[in-house]
Amino acid sequence: MHRKSALVAVALLALAAWTLADSTRYGIGGFTAPGPGLFPFLLAGILCVVSVALLIQHGMRAGAAARLDVTPPETDRHGRKTFWFVAIVLFGYALLLEPLGFVLSSFVSMSMLFKAGNAWRWPAALTAAAATVAIAYGVFIVVLNVPLPRGHWI
Amino acid sequence: MEGAINLLAEGFGQLLHPVTFLHCFVGVSIGTLVGVLPGLGPVATMSMLFPLTMGGDALNSIVMLAGIYYGAMYGGSTTSILVNMPGEAASVVTCLDGYQMAKQGRAGRALGIAAFGSFIGGTLSVVGLMLLATPLSRVALNFGPAEYFGFTVLGLSVCVFVGGRSLLKGCAMAALGLLLGCIGTDLVSGEVRFAYGASMLQDGLDIAPVVMGLFGISEILVNASKRMNTSIIEPQVRGLLPTRDDWKQSLPSIGRGSIVGFLLGLVPGGGSILSSFVSYSIEKRVARDPSRFGKGAIEGVAGPETANNASVASGFIPLFTLGVPSNVVMALLLANLMVHKVAPGPTFISQNPQLFYAIVASMYVGNVLLLVLNLPLIGLWVRFLRIPYGVLFPIIILFCVVGAYSINSSFVDVLVMAIFGLLGVWFRRFDYPLVPLVFAFVLGPTIELSLNQLLIVGGEDYLFIFTRPVAATAFVVAILLTISGLVASGRRFRQGVLDSGDEV
């Protein structure tokens, strides 16, 4: 847990270091004539310091945890599986939205999400998905005129 | 004064236009619904509906989005009282005594006093907004970049200070939010920064997919992986009106809650969550018998519920008079006004009096609508609580996708939302607070612009900010707050945080 938590600080430090270097490309200028790179440069500096402080803190806490023999709690395997399934469906939904169109991509995604979220059989999940997409089509496309992608088939 | 009353009457006239009234009604109804349903707060909902309001006019959008905010404050108490699970963050403390009252068979009276307290606090706060906003706008006309820099930095400091358990993590999130705000065209030089050739990044990241991802999608991902079991206590609709004794006990709490909520709504970084917590601790402190708290004390429901609603209208004062949002919700409303080419600030009320008074009128009407929605129709909202989360979350995801896509008619915004959803889960898991990130992201351009102007105006005088008393006070308070927070954190760390696992 401590090691994974430290990963956030490491990621922030890497981002800060990258920004620190990259902001010089835009011109730092000076305090009397600030360039477009000055503000991000200052922020990246602050983020660097804070990330290093967080890493030191993590190091000290990890050391103490090892001395106290603190073991992280067990994570729920089913929950983790559902989490990643929903996340993958969401990314798939985003990527298929334009090629398949709103109706088809929503129907496919909704079917999988209804199946994953409930102990339903496929016919129930497909029916719920069809009803949800039909209502969403009526509300967003027919009534509110929201410009949603039509796709090749529907 | 007469002019203000005429403008308010005109505002009521505008609000009674069927389309505007419908926006108000839809806003407060959706607000109540998201307040009642655990797992979807007003911030995520407002950002979800944000793109759909971009096509309409400024008044209708603000009326609806503001309605969602104060509607959620009303609705949040229902879930706290009946399920012991806060519908949204500002109702956390209501669980303590509200649920105990429900267990003792006093659910109706708890719901009733929460609704009446919310109505009184909300209405008094709207009166305060109406009376104070115009004179404060005149004062704000004298403010320059130094004051804006001071206020925004103070707001961000308070937000970091109260935003989470770890000050360092809050600082990291604020810095990250400010950096994200740097993406796109620089307001002073016009140079495009950190876009790396991507045309969608040239105008910067849109706030809606970022907020939807961080608050909406991350919440869904976390909750979908849990099995949410809720046991609901059925309220007796007949028992919703508080008794004379209830009123006697609650009225002082409602009065104090109104004042606390109004004042904390004004404070940058304050808002409904802080107001409800402060109000609860005040009620406990002034009570003759503090041991009653946590065991069903009606003051523990009346005070915080009044305070969180009172903070809503006063939160509009810094937005309308300075153009500086006091919390994340106000930041979203600021972004919405900007989309409609309305710039909040010292000249907002003088240049848009009809819009200002129509928004004020909508809050009066919205509060009355909410009283009706939350008392006689309580049974309807309780029914929504029975919908399994497995049915709700796919529908919420569909709403989020439609909302994100409709911003620029591009799937890239949906991808941005999904990425920030995963980031949100990651940050939450390791206790990195999300509110400072979003707040800083919205304030970033204002802070950068005012800092650049301040440096140019000040020239060689690096201490120019200290020649402006208001700016200097705000800036010094911000610095003192950060230093005191860091010193206190360091002390806690040395005093054996390692054993308890607390963060600093």
Image (tube, coloured by chain):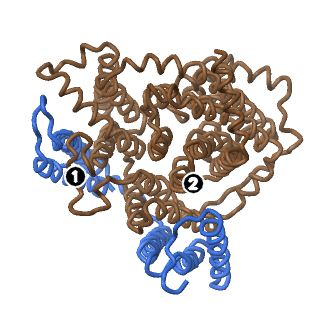
Chain colours: A blue, B brown
What residue sits 22% from the left and 46% below the top?
B190
The CA span between labels 1 and 2 is 37 Å
User: Residue A48 versus residue B463: which sits nearer the camera?
Assistant: B463
User: Residue B388 versus residue A5: which sits nearer the camera?
Assistant: B388
Query: Looking at the image, is B470 positioned above or below residue B411?
Result: above
Mark number displayed over residue B192: 1
The chain carrying label 2 is B
Q: Position of residue B237 (x, y in %)?
A: 86, 44
Mark number displayed over residue B39: 2
- Going from the N terminus, do you reach mark 1 or mark 2 first? 2
Contact flag, marks 1 and 2 (Cβ < 8 Å): no
Quadrant of the rendered image containing residue B425: bottom left
What residue sits 45% from the left and 66% below the top?
B409
Badge 1 amino acid: Val
The chain carrying label 1 is B
In front: label 1 or label 2: 1
Mark number displayed over residue A112: none
Mark 1: few/some/many CA within 10 Å (<14, 14-19, 20+): many
- Relative to B453, is B105 on the left or the right? right
Q: Position of residue B389 (x, y in %)?
A: 62, 63
Badge 2 amino acid: Gly
